Amino acid sequence: MPEYFVVRGTVESGDKRGRELGFPTANIALRDQDGSVGDGVWAGWVRRADGTHVPAAISVGRRPTYYGADGYRLLEAHLLDFSGDLYDETLVVWLGSHLRDQEKYSSAEDLITALKNDIATAAQWTAAHPAASLPPAEESPLGEVRRVRA
């Protein structure tokens, strides 16, 4: 049975670095700063407030390229083939496949190359794991990470 981590949260304003790099993200604060879900890049799905599902490449962690080990743990979802404003919208995020660990990159160019690869891999994974197969996400406190099985 496939297993997912699910997080429900309200999109917060960030430092807009993802947008500057060409990969805007929906930022959700995590209650768990210790790491019950593994840091790294994930393929998954985002359900918007209107009920639509959007495939996503999702980063969970402290953003080591810019903040080292001292950064605040954050979920950052880059919604594939999406443009628009998500600020203050409450989303449900399913983390389905751990693609890689977080890494500290020596340059923005190296990070951009990695993000392009992550997005391509996330698109392949979500194509093979449609939103219709996601397990239900019950109500939970904002920013809480929960483990669910399909």
Image (cartoon, rainbow, N blue to C red):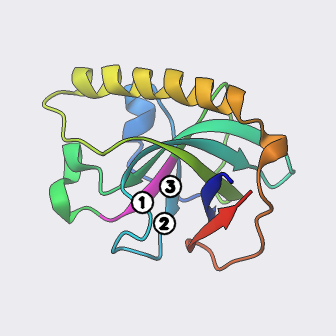
Name which residue lies at 23% across and 41% down: 103
Q: Mark number for residue 29?
A: 2
Q: Name the residue under label 1.
A: 74
Q: How far apart are marks 2 and 1 (CA)?
A: 5 Å
Q: Quadrant of residue 91?
A: bottom right
CB atoms at circles 3 and 2 under 8 Å apart? Answer: no
The relative height of residue 122 versus residue 50 in the rendered view (above or below) is above
Going from the N terminus, do you reach mark 2 or mark 1 first?
2
CB atoms at circles 2 and 1 under 8 Å apart? Answer: yes
Quadrant of the drawing holding the C terminus: bottom right
Going from the N terminus, do you reach mark 3 or mark 1 first?
3
Give the percent coordinates (x, y) of residue 123.
60, 25
Q: What element carries label 3?
A: loop
Going from the N terminus, do you reach mark 3 or mark 2 first?
3
Q: Mark 3 points at which residue?
A: 13
The relative height of residue 92 versus residue 82 in the rendered view (above or below) is below
- Left or right of 110, for residue 150: right
Mark 2 crowdedness (10 Å alpha carbons): few <14, some 14-19, many ≥20:
many
In the foreground, 19 or 119: 119
- Eye-nearest disc, 3 or 1: 1
Mark 1 crowdedness (10 Å alpha carbons): few <14, some 14-19, many ≥20:
many
Q: What stretch is highlighted in magenta?
A: 72-76
Q: What residue type is labelled 2?
A: Ala
Q: Which amino acid does label 3 sit on?
A: Ser
Q: Can residue 83 be seen by looking at this rendering?
A: no
